[in-house]
Image: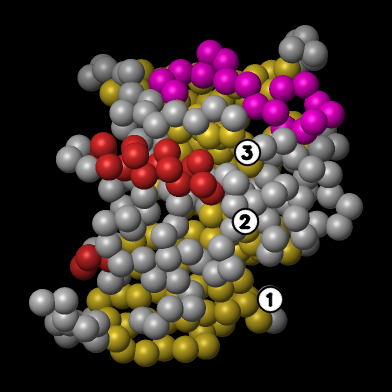
Amino acid sequence: MKIMAGRDCIPDNGVLGLKPDLHSPGKNSVRWLSCAVLAVLLLVGLRLAGAQTLPNNPSPATVQSPSGAGVPGASTPPPAENLSTANCNPCRFKIAETLAPYLVHFQFQSFPNDDQVIESLQVSRDDKPGWSQSLPVHNMDPTSKGEEFFIGSADINFDGYNDLFLVTRRGVANAYADYWLFAPAKEDFTYLGNYPIFTVDSSKRQLSTYERGGHGGLIYQANHYRFINGVLTPTASEKQEATDRQGLYRKSVYQYKDGKLRLIKKETIRPHSTE
């Protein structure tokens, strides 16, 4: 596995502030810290099982626990990979032990001010001459030429095959990525969507996201997801928002029931002063 912390690394979601979970009560100046945190969390996260609940310290990278866990009959995918690179030329990803590596090239779109975005991922295989697939990239923020991008593979839907992801937006608090699921029958990829960076719990077959807002992290949204009948479905959510009264916040908790998220709890929160 190859892990590199680039000079414009993805920041840790909530590393500088409060990071509640679904079961809790309640650019430049930080890049060096983000890079260090990213490298450590990747090294640890790729070797440990996912958290039992939405983690209090959510990782900025897509990580997974031992492959195929909790999936009867699922094959074991290769280890997840996380790369920070200015250009895939190509990047090679092992999707399944029984398949040749998939080669990914970046297709760039450049702008007059020297900014650029990745317009698509061009996917091919050495053992299938003439075969290729273009994966359009969505909602990518422009970056300066030479800056690094974060791309990787992990088994997102717990079927025993690695999937692809590319970080498209990143800030101090939150990062978002495009995800593509591997389709074994066709040996190609289908677009899943653009989401906050997933934390993957293979033992529970569950994905989690955490988005930190303002007010020192007191505004946030945390979600759990599962694949139900092959569809990524939110199964639990907790959201805390500011009210029109200073120092008071409204927390709403939802759980999946009868085919949809339903509100099960709503309360007003007054956090303890830290002064």
Amino acid type assigned to the residue bearing label 1 in the image: Gly
Marks 2 and 3 in Cβ contact (< 8 Å)? no
Q: Which residue is mark 2?
A: 49
Horizontal arrangement in the rendering, residue 4 relative to residue 128 (left or right): left
Q: Which residue is mark 3?
A: 80
Q: Position of residue 4 (x, y in %)?
A: 44, 29
In front of the other: label 2 or label 1? 2
Amino acid type assigned to the residue bearing label 2 in the image: Ala
Segment tinted magenta in the rendering? 85-101
Q: Which residue is mark 1?
A: 259
Query: Going by the picture, which residue comes out furthest to the left?
Result: 275
Asked which quadrant contains residue 31, the reply is top left
Q: Does dot 1 land on a helix, a strand or a loop? A: loop
Asked which quadrant contains residue 170, the reply is top left
Residue at image point 34% right, 39% down: 36
Of pointers 3 and 1, the one earlier in the residue sequence = 3
Neighbour tally class for label 3: few under 14, some 14-19, many 20 plus, Cα within 10 Å: many
Horizontal arrangement in the rendering, residue 102 relative to residue 61 (left or right): right
Query: Going by the picture, which residue comes out furthest to the top?
Result: 129
Residue at image point 74% right, 12% down: 126
Q: Does dot 2 land on a helix, a strand or a loop? A: loop
Amino acid type assigned to the residue bearing label 3 in the image: Ala
Query: Residue 192, relative to residue 90: is it above or below?
Result: below
